Amino acid sequence: MSRGALKDDYTLPYTIRDLPPRVLRELNDRFQRLGEALAKVQGTGERTPTFDNSADMQRFRIKNAADSQDDGDYVTRRELKRYAGYINEQGEHVFEGTIVAPKMVSREKARNSRTVIRRGQAEDATSHNNSVNNVVAGAWVAALVPLTGTSGTLAYTPIEPNTTICILETSNIVLGWADSAPGANKFTTSGTTISVNAARADVTLKVYYRIASVAMHAEMLSGLGAYPTQQAQLTYFPSNPALTNIIWVPANLALRYKSGGSPDVNEFSINNKIVAFGRTLTADGQALAHYPIG
């Protein structure tokens, strides 16, 4: 056997005394690097374990994790439940903290949001009645705008009017934005005036547009008087009744606001805080109202 060959898989052909200094230095260097790599994997010496590939932990999960400390840390389900919304086993959307949004009426009016709005019911965790959260208006409002000829009037002046969504109510055709002089299936705005092409004159538009923030309130309505009834009472006076949105929950149907006269079956009207329906309420929680209060 030559001097440089291995005797077997585990025995070096040299004794330590036979190794040249250069080889000893190389072995020491490699053993040191192996030790450091092992320490990184084991996390010893205040090192953070590092893995080049995904760790296979049987079920691909990390158990018993502490709460995150930095923005780049993974978060636990416990943290998600504490700081964000989640869906419980009943399929309900739950928020466990307090919702405070920018430019709301006041911070004091932010409700603890342990309120779960179920289909046909809103329940407040503290009072167990149909009072609900004050919700801050996003800067978006929705309105039905009847046109006289080719123009109509919005309740507010849109900001960023080119982001406005405009839909023909009868046919659900979406009209495109134009800076001026709208052509066929186009619209434009100037201040609170919205205008369309002559081909679309005297129609009603569904308009969704962005405005400076306004406080909004949302609540599930209870019937006014004994059931069956066609009236309900709002908690607050709407600052602009025409911007009120009411959803008929059993059919997931948006009802249309009527400014005067008796409402038809898919309409509602508002007088002070009293809402009159063209449909008959037979139980609480059949109508969800969202309306401006400031």
Image: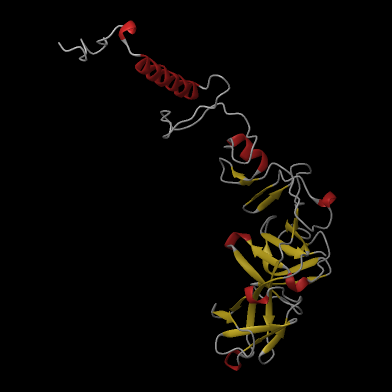
Q: How many marks?
A: 0
Q: Residue furthest front?
A: 21
Is residue 282 or residue 2 the one in the foreground? 2
For image coordinates 53% across by 19% down, the residue present is: 44
Compared across the picture, whether 32 is left or right of 235 comes to left
Report x, y in % for residue 116.
67, 47
Residue at the location (43% across, 28% down)?
Answer: 57
Image quarter in which the C terminus is found: bottom right
> Colour scheme in the image?
secondary structure
Task: Residue at 63%, 68% (x, y): give it.
Answer: 254
Residue furthest to the left: 1
Q: Quadrant of residue 268?
A: bottom right
Q: Residue placed at 41% from the left, 28% from the top?
A: 58
Q: Position of residue 82 (x, y in %)?
A: 67, 38
**Whole-percent x and y of residue 12?**
27, 11
Above or below for 224 versus 123: below
Could you tell me which quadrant the N terminus lies in?
Answer: top left
Question: 174 or 161: nearer the eye?
Answer: 161
26, above or below 52, in the image: above
**Nearest to the observer: residue 130 or residue 135:** 135
Task: Give residue 123's position: percent from left, percent from top.
Answer: 71, 47
Tell me where residue 197 sits by quadrant: bottom right
Quarter residue 10 falls in: top left
Q: Is residue 267 left or right of residue 88?
A: right
